[in-house]
Amino acid sequence: MSNLINISEAASLALHGLVFIAKNQPSRINVKVLAEELNASQTHLAKVFQKLGKANLVRSLRGPAGGFELNKPAEDITFLEIYEIIDGEIILGDCPLGKNHCVFKSCIFDNELNRISQDIYETFSKMKLSEFS
Amino acid sequence: MSNLINISEAASLALHGLVFIAKNQPSRINVKVLAEELNASQTHLAKVFQKLGKANLVRSLRGPAGGFELNKPAEDITFLEIYEIIDGEIILGDCPLGKNHCVFKSCIFDNELNRISQDIYETFSKMKLSEFS
DNA sequence: GCTATTTAGGTACTTAAATTCCTAAATAAG
DNA sequence: CTTATTTAGGAATTTAAGTACCTAAATAGC
Ligand code: FES
Ligand code: FES
């Protein structure tokens, strides 16, 4: 079994968690609650949100009644942004595999797959947190 | 750094190797030569071609002057076929991540990403070995 | 101030996938 | 028939992702 689009478990957690937080605005949500709601690993979620915090997508408050909340309006947060924070920067080069040189004259995937990579990129950039139901 | 389309190194080796073999038909090519030509790991390539052989995409001959050759016309081999042999069967379900249940009412990726997964699938199925330059 | 709660961050463990290593089996050539 | 070559297949290793654990720092509430 194989997924065609490359999205890690961590990025999925980030998105699902942020959607939950967005829906529950303006309440602050802590990872314990979030993990229960998402039915996910609390520690993994904590690590993921640590990254989101560092990137200033969310702000965190420690201590009792602490937790996470969005640091900007949900409609200003795209899935592209979330994705790149967690899975790393996307580089749209000449080869959809990110290779620099092909043993053949030029990347044999040319055209078709690059078109799709571009499509995914643009789609990611259009998906706003506010739109996830 | 992250690739948007999920294609393993193994699947890439399979494709590049098969393209090389297709171009050099009707000669038989052995993995040593192939690894040099592709500038790739010989052992990995060997494993990959073992799978391709088992799936009858190529036929193999052991011993001196042995090697691999296509088992059917290049125009009858699609990248989809190659991909699934190496990376596993593609399942186009309701969620592009292959999850069964979303904690939200329905998969929050609905529509857009599934459209793209479908697009990738169809594109893979149209890419014939004979067309790779 | 003290205590309980909660995030931050480092380290360590676990698991699965990718890759390599090693020996056996096939076969062509002499 | 013997030898060199080459694929087959299993075992072992490496790597990366995910997960857990532990201590420190912040802070709210009393
Ligand atoms: S470099 Fe893109 S496929 Fe060979
Ligand atoms: S199930 Fe597809 S995103 Fe939650």
Image (cartoon, coloured by chain):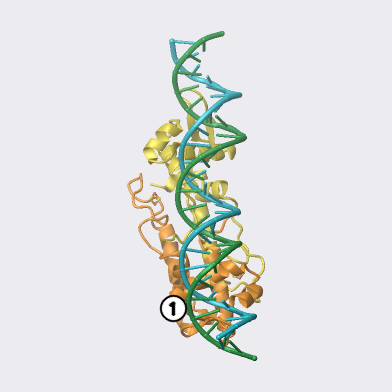
Chain colours: A yellow, B orange, C green, D cyan
The residue where tag 1 is placed is B56
Residue D11 percent coordinates (x, y): 50, 59
With A39 as the anchor, is A105 left or right in this view?
right
Ligand 1 within 8 Å of disc 1? The answer is no
Say which quarter of the image contains residue C9.
top right
Percent from the top left, x then y, of residue B7? 52, 64
Quadrant in which residue A3 is drawn: bottom left
Chain bearing tag 1 is B
Vertical arrangement, residue B82 with respect to residue C4, above or below: below
Given residues A106 and C4, the one toward you in this image is C4
Screen quadrant of the C terminus of chain B: bottom right
Question: Height in image: C12 above or below A115?
Answer: above
Nearer to us in this view, A112 or A42: A42
Question: What residue is drawn where x is 51% and y is 79%?
Answer: B129
On the image, the x and y values in percent for residue A39 come to 38, 40
Residue B12 lies, with reference to residue A16, above or below; the image says: below
Residue A75 visible in the shown view: yes
State the residue at coordinates (60%, 61%): A92
Taking depth in this image into account, of A53 and C2 the one nearest to the observer is C2
As helix, strand or loop, the secondary structure at mark 1 comes to loop
Front in this rendered view, residue B51 or B9: B51
Task: Please give the name of the residue rendered at 41% of the width and 57% of the height, measured from the top-left corner.
Answer: B96
Q: Is residue A111 above or below residue B114?
A: below
Residue B19 quadrant: bottom right
* Residue B62: percent from left, percent from top: 53, 80
Q: Is residue D4 left or right of residue B26?
A: right
Q: Residue at x 57, y 73 (%)?
A: B16
Q: In the rendered structure, which amino acid carries the disc numbered 1? A: Asn
